[in-house]
Amino acid sequence: MDEQLIQRLHGLMDRGEALLDRFERRADGAAMVDWQAPAFRWSRHDRLQPISRVNNLPLSDLHGIAAQKDSLVANTRQFLNGKPANNALLWGARGTGKSSLIRALLHEFADRGLRLVQVDARDLVDLPDIAPLLSDRPERFIIFCDDLSFGDDDPGYKALKSMLDGSLLAPPDNLLIYATSNRRHLLPEYLDENRQACNVDGEIHHGDAVEEKLSLSERFGLWLSFYPFDQDAYLAIVRSHLDRLGQAVDGDASFRRAALQWALARGVRSGRAARQFALHWLGQQPDEPA
């Protein structure tokens, strides 16, 4: 037999074995998953790891982001009702409730079949393996990508871009992607890239580098922007945390002064700073007499 033909046959056999192994790992991975869990974390080695205790809050405990909350809840309800819904990008200032809002959806809708699958940015290259594990399930899955950003040559960038919109293979009907990021376009932006823009008949045309970066974020159908809180909103969030923890502070001038100093020391008035101060304030209170 011709030596070239033999080499081609060996190559085809190797590829067939690799495909069979990949299929078996997918089937084994789906069979071994505890589907009763409300959330999962994807690990390349351990596949879908169940998370039994989820760090979330009720939607009613999230303050200062009413418009963003309404939009994401409406989109998620559409998804759960089997209606068309969009992948969502929540971007903006740090500590303003982006991740908390997505986690709170699970508190609200887990009994209707909603499940979260957290996938780290470095593991987004596995999206083509994750989707088939979920596609035949009756639950509705949101792939949760937290604090998402990419380097210029990050392999997860193209995998996410293809999954959102661009692959010949349609994503499962029971799957959406919700991502959070401090960057609007998920990639670093450089001053030199703006210099590539040109004026064509009075219209601004971006250079290739900027167009490439826009192309990923624009594949999310729903954009929600989060901004730093003003002073009144920040103090209201602190009070809500303390109320939930059973500590009343109405009319306490020392509380207001301490809360503002806490935010000033951190250089930000955010929901995260408000929660951290509430825990600090509560821990500083004297014990009740026995």
Image (cartoon, rainbow, N blue to C red):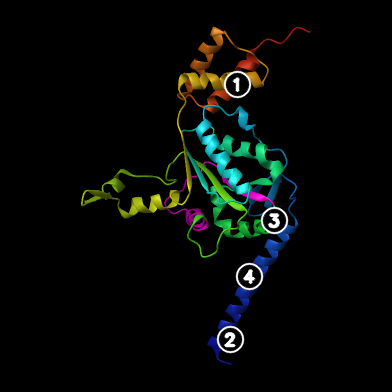
At horizontal 54% and vertical 36% (from top left) the residue drawn is 70
Helix, strand or loop for disc 4: helix
Q: How many marks?
A: 4
Q: CA distance from mark 4 to mark 2?
A: 20 Å
Judge by depth and name the residue closer to the eye, 182 or 8: 182
Judge by depth and name the residue closer to the eye, 78 or 16: 78
Q: Seen in the image, is 138 located left or right of residue 92? A: right
Residue closest to the far bottom? 1
Residue receiving disc 4: 19
Type of residue at label 4?
A: Leu
Magenta residues span: 139-163
The earlier-in-sequence mark between 1 and 2 is 2
Type of residue at label 2?
A: Ile
Q: CA distance from mark 1 to mark 4?
A: 53 Å
Helix, strand or loop for disc 2: helix
Q: Relative to 290, does residue 37 appear above or below in the rendering?
A: below
Helix, strand or loop for disc 1: helix
Asked if the residue under mark 2 is in contact with the one under mark 4, i.e. CB atoms within 8 Å, the reply is no
Which numbered dot is residue 240? 1
Type of residue at label 1?
A: Ser
Asked if the residue under mark 3 is in contact with the one under mark 1, i.e. CB atoms within 8 Å, the reply is no
Q: CA distance from mark 1 to mark 3?
A: 38 Å
Residue receiving disc 2: 6
Q: Seen in the image, is 206 located left or right of residue 49? A: left
Tag 1: Cα neighbours inside 10 Å, few (<14), some, or many (≥20)?
many
Instruction: Decide whether residue 145 is among the magenta residues.
Output: yes
Q: CA distance from mark 3 to mark 2?
A: 42 Å
Q: Quadrant of the C terminus?
A: top right
